[in-house]
Image (spheres, coloured by chain):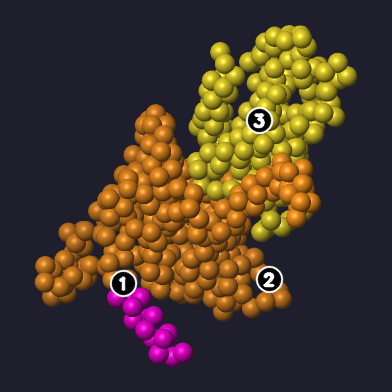
Chain colours: A yellow, B orange
Amino acid sequence: MSDFLKNSIRFVLFILVQVFVLFKIPPLHRFVTPYLYFLFILWLPFNMPRLRLTFIGFLFGLCLDYFTHSPGLHAAACTLIAYLRPFVINLLISQEGADKNYGSPSITSMGWAPYGTYVLVLTLFHHVYLVFLEWMNFGSLWFFLGKIIATTGISLLLVLLTELLFYRKEKFRTNTV
Amino acid sequence: MRNVFLFIRRYFNFLFFLVLQIISLSFLFRYNKFHEAIFMNSAMEITGSLNQRYNTISYYFQLKKTNEALIKENERLNQLLKANFEGPDSTKKLTIDTFKIDSVQRTIKYVYLQAKVVDNSVSSQANFLTLHRGSAQQVRVNTGVISSEGIVGKVVNVSDNYASVMSLLNRQFHLVVKIKNGGDRGVVEWDGLSPFYITLKDIPKSARVKIGDSVVTSQTSELYPPDIMVGTVFEIIDDKSSNFYTLKLKTATNFFNVEYVYVTPNLQYAEQKKLEDSTRKKIQ
């Protein structure tokens, strides 16, 4: 399956799962909003040009915004993590140049610890920015911190479950190709 | 000049990122003005039809509760029937005032249009509902939406077949309401904490409020028919530094299982607004 087709299917699936499964869960607490959709951006291939990556992030966020009636909220957060993604990968990638040997970021291509850090950092960036925008008008520090921590915790759990359930096989490609 | 181009070329990624950020933030903060610009209406047709498909399944799980709500409403309406009232004294005659629908002169003020709720959120800070009834079926922007239990919200956007409703559980929703017992008016809003409770502000301390009192819509609001339930007083917060109470209300509508609502267009509002606007012009 080509990368384009695979990612198009993921695009639709992540939006649908977020809107019709995760957003439909009855609220446990006002701090807890289960977010998983941004994993789409983390799973995009290494070799995607940065300009296109940022734009896809924007488009992806905007699609979710149409469902939540909040134009711009998720788009802003997704653009941010899509823009920051290459910097984080450059910092975390091992010396051998895994970004040339493998297709996209995953546990096999990056290793447990760097991949975990990668997910954690971008999840945090996403949630901090999202909650910051959401609470800009209402301003209470405890809500801000509480919501970031609780939402990040839930998101990391969901990401872990997704990684375990949908194990992605990454083919090893040599540098010479 | 050359340096400017070099700068743009060098930092093109960053500038592109900034432009996208500015676009999305302006969508966010100038929400109402950008509906047209970002094709919100045509997008609503698509998201609405997806939501409707989802709703055909989830509706079955709510059938019991919907039925109960309808039975309760029927009971309340039946209780209002003229035939239920009879005095021992036949000289006393009981009449019930209703608006007549006259073909010559229309005295009806509010019309009830039923609509199916196809999407509803309670967990975010800005909650919206989507109704499967749009501008092709007489729904207009800025009309009230009520359920059989109490008020739900107001229409903020319509497409051909769907309408987007700002829920009472939205931090931008404000409405003037009154306490049924005594008629003191205040402003109701949501503090974003719990989907079961809303806040009523600016009730003067002269008002005699008890826990459990009903709070209903006031006739000064053009959106809703008067005396529609908003909530019941749950807690009275006495702020010593001001002359006003802040009341915590339990919402009359259960937002977790609202399935059918009524849109209530005000047919006389155009005339009222014209008068109010011309008055404002005269005074200036």
The reply to whether the C-beta atoms of the residues labelled 1 and 2 are less than 8 Å apart is no
Residue at 28% x, 71% y is B268
Which residue is pictured at 76% across the width and 51% down the height?
B2
* Residue corresponding to mark 1: B270
Within-10-Å neighbours for mark 2: few <14, some 14–19, many 20+: few
Nearer to us in this view, A107 or B262: A107
Q: Quadrant of the N terminus of chain A?
A: top right
Horizontal and vertical percent for residue A92? 84, 26
The answer to whether residue A88 is visible is: yes
Q: Amino acid at mark 2?
A: Asp
Looking at the image, the residue that sits furthest to the front is B2
Q: Residues within 10 Å of mark 1 (few under 14, many from 20)?
A: few
- Which secondary structure, mark 1? helix
* Residue named by callout 3: A41
Tell me which segment is drawn in magenta: B270-284
Sequence-first disc among 1 and 2? 2
The quadrant of the image that shows the C terminus of chain A is top right
State how far apart marks 1 and 2 are (Cα): 40 Å
Question: Which x, y percent locates residue B14?
Answer: 73, 44
Residue position for label 2: B239
At label 3, counting other C-alpha atoms closer than 10 Å, the crowd grade (few under 14, some 14-19, many 20 or more) is many
Quick one: A51 or B143, which is closer to the camera? A51
Residue at disc 3, secondary structure: helix
Magenta span includes B7: no
